[in-house]
Image: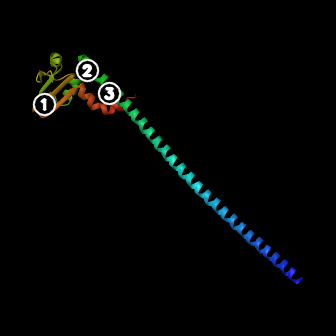
Amino acid sequence: MAIADLLEALEREAAAEVAAIDAAARAEVDAKLAAAAAAREVRRRGAVARACAARQAQLDGAEAEAARHARRAVLTARAAALARVRAACAAPVDALVARDDVLAALVAAVLASGGAEGEVRCGPALVARVRALVAPVVAVRPDAAIVGGLVASRADGRVEIDATLATLLDRLWPHLRLEVRP
């Protein structure tokens, strides 16, 4: 019976060895599965993070483009409103200069700027009224090209003073346009 006991002992040892190898293999498989699952989770999180970052970049770009478009629309509307305001300011120039107080203010501005000697040019319709407002030593000449005011030259001819409402509007426009709200 010693052989039967020996065979039985060998079978038990072989079964124990197979069980140990099987347990080790299962543990190795479980470890590899866990490592693979962890690596997959890292890759998944990385992919999600990259996709989120790409989508956020798209959203940021779209938001920036929408903001640029809105600013462009506002600036276009403001420019159109300013053009309408400027046209409305320039349109009644002849009517304004027809007022005695406005013409007197323009003549006073010219005289204060050194146009008290020399010549004053104005539209033909204003010649008589301007002559009445300046000293007799100042020559008043009609000039059909001058609209809405007058232009004076000193006696030496070096300095020309433009007191037309259009020129005054041009000078004041950078400040006035800041006050206009569309």
In the rendered image, residue 45, in percent from the top left (x then y), is placed at: 59, 54
Front-lying residue, 3 or 153: 3
Categorize mark 2 by other alpha carbons within 10 Å: few (<14), some (14-19), many (20+).
some
User: Can you name the residue that lies furthest to the bottom here?
Assistant: 2
Quadrant of residue 133 in the image?
A: top left
- According to the picture, the residue beneath numbered tag 1 turns out to be 154
The structure residue drawn at horizontal position 12% and vertical position 26%, both measured from the top left corner, is 119
Front-lying residue, 112 or 140: 140
Categorize mark 1 by other alpha carbons within 10 Å: few (<14), some (14-19), many (20+).
some
Determine whether the residue tagged by mark 2 lies in a helix, strand or loop: helix
Against 66, residue 15 (above or below) is below
Earlier in the chain: of badge 3 and badge 2, it is 3
Front-lying residue, 112 or 86: 86
What amino acid is found at the position of numbered circle 2 in the picture? Answer: Val
Earlier in the chain: of badge 3 and badge 1, it is 3
Determine whether the residue tagged by mark 1 lies in a helix, strand or loop: loop
Is 79 on the left or on the right of 129, as rendered? right
- According to the picture, the residue beneath numbered tag 3 turns out to be 83
In the rendered image, residue 121, in percent from the top left (x then y), is placed at: 14, 24
- According to the picture, the residue beneath numbered tag 2 turns out to be 93
Against 2, residue 120 (above or below) is above
Is 77 on the left or on the right of 96, as rendered? right
Earlier in the chain: of badge 2 and badge 1, it is 2
The structure residue drawn at horizontal position 39% and vertical position 35%, both measured from the top left corner, is 72
Is 41 on the left or on the right of 172, as rendered? right
Categorize mark 3 by other alpha carbons within 10 Å: few (<14), some (14-19), many (20+).
few
Q: CA distance from mark 3 to mark 1?
A: 35 Å
